[in-house]
Amino acid sequence: MQYLEIKNKTILITGAAGFIGANLVLELLKTQSPVNIIGIDNLNDYYDVSIKEWRLKEIERVAAEKSESIWTFIKGSIADKQIITDIFNNYQPQIVVNLAAQAGVRYSITNPDVYIESNLIGFYNILEACRHSYDDGAKGVEHLVYASSSSVYGTNKKVPYSTDDKVDNPVSLYAATKKSNELMAHAYSKLYNIPSTGLRFFTVYGPAGRPDMAYFGFTNKLLKGETIQIFNYGNCKRDFTYVDDIVEGVKRVMQAPPEKKNGEDGLPIPPYAVYNIGNSHPENLLEFVDILQQELIRAGVLPEDYDFEAHKKLVPMQPGDVPVTYADTSALERDFGFKPSTSLRDGLRKFAEWYKEFYKI
């Protein structure tokens, strides 16, 4: 594994107004300046756009403080091939981090089109642009890092989930598109010697997160006095991973592209890798809700005498969902000396404090 310096590099981050994307941009500006970051996002309304706009304002504020760095934001879709071609021609990114994707398991059941557009066509456009970045002997892209997902493991019975496990039985279209990304990246790594690393993220949460995630949706409902539904009668376990841990993992991986080398046949061995990034500590959903309610009361989002029992309903499993997610992160620890470690209480406390401030409660 070779080391790639991030400073003074031109980096393309897709999904830059998204939860992980925006946090990654902020981290790179704060710790890797001078750096030239191009962000693209279509700012779609899958969830409240004001949260995406708030994230972009945070980036602009930090970028203004780091005057030696350059931050360029482009509003557009990675499914638009011309936009991607233009970005590669104009900026010639050396590192590409593809975080743009239509997320969410349940939404993929009702709105499949957007998953094909963003996750397959969009990712294909990125791969093609990386491929052509080497045209005419140019140095081109030095590392492509892209988001995969823990959902590729489907209903695998063996836990914790290891990247050595077979993942050929997705239980949602979303999972199928993420598995497809890994397969497409492998083919392009083999054919065109593009160093690529896929990251299977496990249930990412934190301040300014996605409102379609359980912790955020629960908070919105409890505040309105509505009932929250806890699936699989509370017998779901999730490997909740705090966003700062995810970003630290991505940053380390960016700096270590898989090595280019040839096999005995003289052809490239694909410079390709996949890692899990998770907390490797699954939490029961009922315990999770318990900690969340304590932190919402502590932050002053909910009153001290809130009656949670009256607002909780245990319901069966939903289609496309899985009962447990659990990351084996030993490869990440081995290669990068890093293991996510933020406790659920610390992470939910930061979320509750942000929520109170953002919604001015």
Image (cartoon, grey):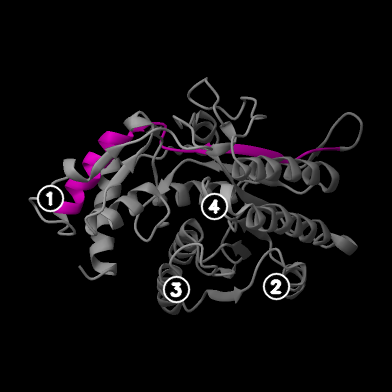
Residue 34, position as x, y percentages in the image: 53, 70
Of badges 2 and 4, the one in the foreground is 4
Of badges 4 and 3, the one in the foreground is 4
Distance between mark 2 and mark 3 Cα atoms: 24 Å
Over which residues does the magenta segment extend? 268-297
Amino acid type of disc 1?
Tyr
Of badges 4 and 1, the one in the foreground is 1
**For numbered disc 2, what is the local secondary structure?**
helix
10 Å crowding of disc 2: few (<14), some (14-19), many (20+): some
Of the image marks 4 and 3, the number of the one nearer the N terminus? 3
Quarter of the image for the C terminus: give it.
bottom left
Is 16 above or below relative to 241?
below
The answer to which image quadrant residue 231 occupies is top left
Residue carrying label 1: 306
Residue carrying label 2: 91
Q: In this figure, what is the number of numbered marks?
A: 4
Residue carrying label 3: 53
Residue 247, position as x, y percentages in the image: 47, 52
